[in-house]
Image (cartoon, coloured by chain):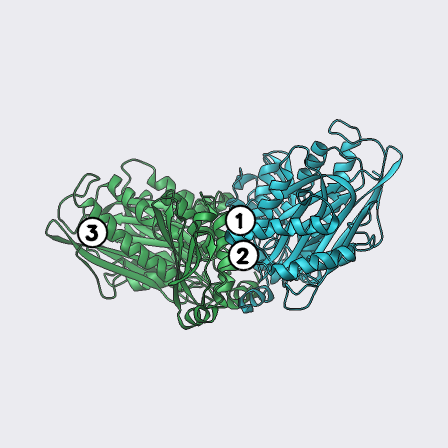
Chain colours: A green, B cyan
Amino acid sequence: MDWEWIENGSVTSPEGFLASGVACSIKTTGNKDLALIVSETPCVAAATFTTNKVKAAPVLVSKENLKPRKAMVRAIVVNSGNANCCTGAKGIEDARKMCEETGRALEIPAHQVLVASTGIIGRTLPMDRIISGIRQATQLLSRNGGQDAAEAILTTDSFPKSRALRFAVGGSEVRIGGIAKGAGMIAPQMATMLAFLTTDARVEKTALQQALRYAVDRSFNSIAVDGDTSTNDTVFLLANWQGGGPTISLDSPHFPVFQSVLTTLCQELSQLIVRDGEGASKFVEIRVKGAESDKDARAVALTVANSVLVKTALFGNDPNWGRIAAAVGRAPAKVRLESLTIQVGDFLCLDKGEPVPFDEGRVHHWLKENRDIFLVIDLGIGSGKWSVWTCDLTVDYVRFNAEYTT
Amino acid sequence: MDWEWIENGSVTSPEGFLASGVACSIKTTGNKDLALIVSETPCVAAATFTTNKVKAAPVLVSKENLKPRKAMVRAIVVNSGNANCCTGAKGIEDARKMCEETGRALEIPAHQVLVASTGIIGRTLPMDRIISGIRQATQLLSRNGGQDAAEAILTTDSFPKSRALRFAVGGSEVRIGGIAKGAGMIAPQMATMLAFLTTDARVEKTALQQALRYAVDRSFNSIAVDGDTSTNDTVFLLANWQGGGPTISLDSPHFPVFQSVLTTLCQELSQLIVRDGEGASKFVEIRVKGAESDKDARAVALTVANSVLVKTALFGNDPNWGRIAAAVGRAPAKVRLESLTIQVGDFLCLDKGEPVPFDEGRVHHWLKENRDIFLVIDLGIGSGKWSVWTCDLTVDYVRFNAEYTT
């Protein structure tokens, strides 16, 4: 497939998208904390939200705005520094007000605005500051504003995450761009995984939603930092059709191409999130194969990725594969010890349930010398497979998450 | 109910039980690493085992020995320092050999011996040393050997865990004793939760098994240190009937008494395990009520107890109740934000989904000044309730689990 990264790509790389990011004192640090992403024309939209039963107000309000079958979207407004979660009836009112104020500033209907928040739970939003932030952000909207927006959605992330790529659909060049922040609930201020994606490809609504679900499953839903699921997790994808080319519907020959390129973009953004995991010293790919189904493979990969014992062993460069075997065994999946094979990198440790003598010093050395490592787990049952990305659990992670005081 | 602790109580407190613990160089430290618990007469036995699908060889062999409907048990042999897990066919052979050698030394059938192991995964047992250890332990069996046995089953625990209590059944005094070690998989060498219980009460087999299941659910299965489930977790309960008194069957009026006293003993032992959690600086009780069912309450309590973010916040004495709300929301249970109430100790934070202004400094101070703390979570839905005990996640835990190298 032909696609390539766009240099300094972002949500504003696709045609017809504007963005901005401003500081309006929601954060006490003075950093940017309000982002606006706007399309010049109405967009078809797709979304995925947190599965947490405690949902933040902006999640509920955005769901509401996306509910009508013919809902079109013009803008996304995001604040960082405050999650607007567990804020009761006032929280819902405030999230709606963010849409209204954005609609007023842009002269579009409020229901064409989606809203997201990230930050601390349980505090009401400083609405005066947010309203003036929205007005300021509207003034600053530009075709180069993607990087500012990427900065404005961060909480404890150490760098902004922004990418875009271009590819051909039936002879026309189209683009997908995106910005993202924070790995799940890794942060002391209850950071959230947020991603905002834009495209100028001509994708129909059902195709857009299905492609997003596919891509998110293989990217943002296949990373693990600490196993906690935020109340605010949100991914939005807007398509404004300005890039031209043929319409991409579910049965279009171009659909698999769009879906695959979107997945590549989402995987890149989600891996940046893992690399920026709090205190992380290692980037770990966990490859599971031989499972009864892809679902089983994923359950095993996520259980290993969330094992505190596996993560601390990796931090210590300890080839303690017994911890991996134990995590595999407690995963909600079909597992048989007698067909289980485990590799740490290229080093075989367990072969169909039988331990393999291996040079521990050499594996320790390999772990120590490499920041990017991988584990291979073969369940020896079927042909299901899945990969998950995670980081290690370090002393710095605990320190960082403990030293913060509300 | 009338019961009391027995001073320096252990598995040898009930009539007719002998025990010993010896050092036979399975551990490199020279510490005791082989324990024997023996009844003078055959016992009715009950057991619960790990739910991990990767099961250690001693788990499989003990299950085999307990399988016949009329199986009677005379002895338990336990080694620490090596889990005999992921050791293939040789591992099964070795676990069986431990039963045979114990049977030979005690002059009883091998199938009347149960076996357990704890320690590192993936290495074959040093059988020569274990066999000489079994012979030595047989020589040292005594009515005061409970404490030695409690020591010999430890891995990274910092103190032996041993308790016994006495109570009356139909005018006769009977006893239950027990020893335990290691909280789940908290240890660098893959420590396991093991508990061995003895009683001289006259309890029928089905009643014994049901009482044990009830007690274990409310004790060893209601503690969380790091969320990992060992491949070796085992609880055995032997009843030799030497205390006299009426027979306790499922429909006996004495059954609820026995079950309740057994639960008290198991809760005490399991709480000792949590207090001895690696690097733990806090002992935390999580009380959930108002759930649709006890099962839901337990799911919520365990999810909160295993949340890395909640545990690091507690380490930092941070009253960050938003992390608790988020963990509640991702538990596999019926949860409604609008009926959710959260207290940190006696301090109300969230009242039926509405945040309550509270003095953060005061709560921080309370957390800082108390080693034993509690959280109360009211789901506001039904009358289901459950309590779980856990500890915080500290810098020392990570250091300890990372610095170990196989």
In the drawing, does residue A249 fall left or right of residue B54?
Answer: left
Q: Is residue A171 above or below residue B368?
A: above
Distance from the alpha carbon under mark 3 to that under mark 1 = 38 Å
Q: Position of residue A205 (x, y in %)?
A: 25, 41
Name the residue that disc number 3 marks. A200
Distance from the alpha carbon under mark 1 to that under mark 2 = 9 Å
* Mark number displayed over residue B327: 1
Q: Position of residue B300 (x, y in %)?
A: 57, 44
Q: Is residue A334 above or below residue B392?
A: above
Q: Of helix, strand and loop, which one carries label 3?
A: loop
Q: A68 or A100, which lies in front?
A: A68
Query: What residue do we see at 22% from left, 39% from top?
Result: A250
Name the residue that disc number 2 marks. B309
What chain does mark 1 sit on? B
Q: Of helix, strand and loop, which one carries label 2?
A: helix
Q: A45 or B6, which lies in front?
A: B6
Q: Is residue A398 above or below residue B13?
A: below
Determine whether label 1 and label 2 are within 8 Å by CB. Answer: yes
Q: Amino acid at mark 3?
A: Asp
